């Protein structure tokens, strides 16, 4: 079994918990995930299996989609609903729908985001959440992220002195949606946090394709596998017909980029997939030091 199984992660489990359970269901050790989801977050968690684990780094570069709930009125130390309250704002119910929409729309495009206190990003060799749990303040990194699409979904709810609304967000790798919620609040001049989150797409796999543990255990897990050929379908692909060329690729030899450009008909292809009889053989990418050469990125033994 090689590829990815998109799991619909339930609340209460870490990504590592999901991997361990998948190993038991599949009776195999070569299992990994493509990026953590916090325990309280649900939705798409792509689980790589077999030779699909070689694509983890590549898959993580793809855009992600989320459906989030933002609450205006108080903030927390974790920036989500699980943390301790750190600040409150009065009279947030007077904020208009139009003001909310303007604040939300302002984050479309490139934006500099400070990594939250409770994150696994390392500073001086230790994870930020380790400092936070000990009450140690450290300088947190600021990263450039990109919001491809963002918009309010549904009506704005006003009750008990709080304001709640939902967002649909498509963003780059490394974007913290809880921090985005806090920053939207700051733009409105009030305290805020992310009160719920569902990941609706990751690695090109949508929530409607994700499977539950119960479905995997009741059926045949093979039916849920997204094959490697589909995962790399967006790359220029060369079907190898010549045996001598196949020998070069199978053995991971470097190749002239001019040969590749001729075969794929693209001048700017920086990554190319090779197949033999429709079966993925490997992916090559531009040599970091020689612009006229391509070298192996990942090779598959299927």
Image (cartoon, rainbow, N blue to C red):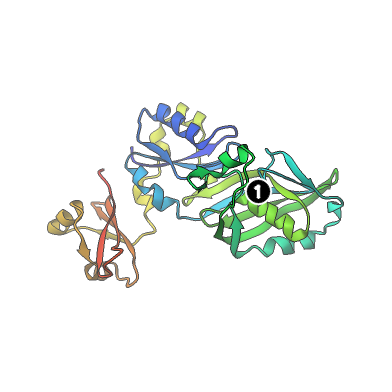
Residue at screen point 55% across, 58% down: 143
Quadrant in the picture for the N terminus: top left
Q: Position of residue 235 (x, y in %)?
A: 36, 59
Q: In the rendering, at what x and y percent does residue 176 appear? A: 59, 51
Quarter-of-image position of residue 146 = bottom right
Q: Residues within 10 Å of mark 1 (few under 14, many from 20)?
A: many
Residue 42 visible somewhere in the drawing: no
Closest to the observer, 166 or 172: 172
Which is nearer the eye, 21 or 138?
Answer: 138
Residue found at the very far bottom of the displayed protein: 267
Residue to which mark 1 is pinned: 68
Counting labels gives: 1
Kindly indicate the quadrant of the structure image that contains residue 83: top right
Q: Position of residue 256 (x, y in %)?
A: 21, 67
Q: Residue at x 60, y 63 (%)?
A: 111
Secondary structure of the residue carrying tag 1 is strand
Q: Position of residue 158 (x, y in %)?
A: 83, 48
Q: Which image quarter is the C terminus in?
A: top left
Residue at figure coordinates x 54%, y 42% from the top left = 37
Q: Is residue 221 visible?
A: yes
| In the image: residue 143, left or right of residue 56 | right
Instruction: Decide: is 26 above or below 163.
Output: above
């Amino acid at each position: 079994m090689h590829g990815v199984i998109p799991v619909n992660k339930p609340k209460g489990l870490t990504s590592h918990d999901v991997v361990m359970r998948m190993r038991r269901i599949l009776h195999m050790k070569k299992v990994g995930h493509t990026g953590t989801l916090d325990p309280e977050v649900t939705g798409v968690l792509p689980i790589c299996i077999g030779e699909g684990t070689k694509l983890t780094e590549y898959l993580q570069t793809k855009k992600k989609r989320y459906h989030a709930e933002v609450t205006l009125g108080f903030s927390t130390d974790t920036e989500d609903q699980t943390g301790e309250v750190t600040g409150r704002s009065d009279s947030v119910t007077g904020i208009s729908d139009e003001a909310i929409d303007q604040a939300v729309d302002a984050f479309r495009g490139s934006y500099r985001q400070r990594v939250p206190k409770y994150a696994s990003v390392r500073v001086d060799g230790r994870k930020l959440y380790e400092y936070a749990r000990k009450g140690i303040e450290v300088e947190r990194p600021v990263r450039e992220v990109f919001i491809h699409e963002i918009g309010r979904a549904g009506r704005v709810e006003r009750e008990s002195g709080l304001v709640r609304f939902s967002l649909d967000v498509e963003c780059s790798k490394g974007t913290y949606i809880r921090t985005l919620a806090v920053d939207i609040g700051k733009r409105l001049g009030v305290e805020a946090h992310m009160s719920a989150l569902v990941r609706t797409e990751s690695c090109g796999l949508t929530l409607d394709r994700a499977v539950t543990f119960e479905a995997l255990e009741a059926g045949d897990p093979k039916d849920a596998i997204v094959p490697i050929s589909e995962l790399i379908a967006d790359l220029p692909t060369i079907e190898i017909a010549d045996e001598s060329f196949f020998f070069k690729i199978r053995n991971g030899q470097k190749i002239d980029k001019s040969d590749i450009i001729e075969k794929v008909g693209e001048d700017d292809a920086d990554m190319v997939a090779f197949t033999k009889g429709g079966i993925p053989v490997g992916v090559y990418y531009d040599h970091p030091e020689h612009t006229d050469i391509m070298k192996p990125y990942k090779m598959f033994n299927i």
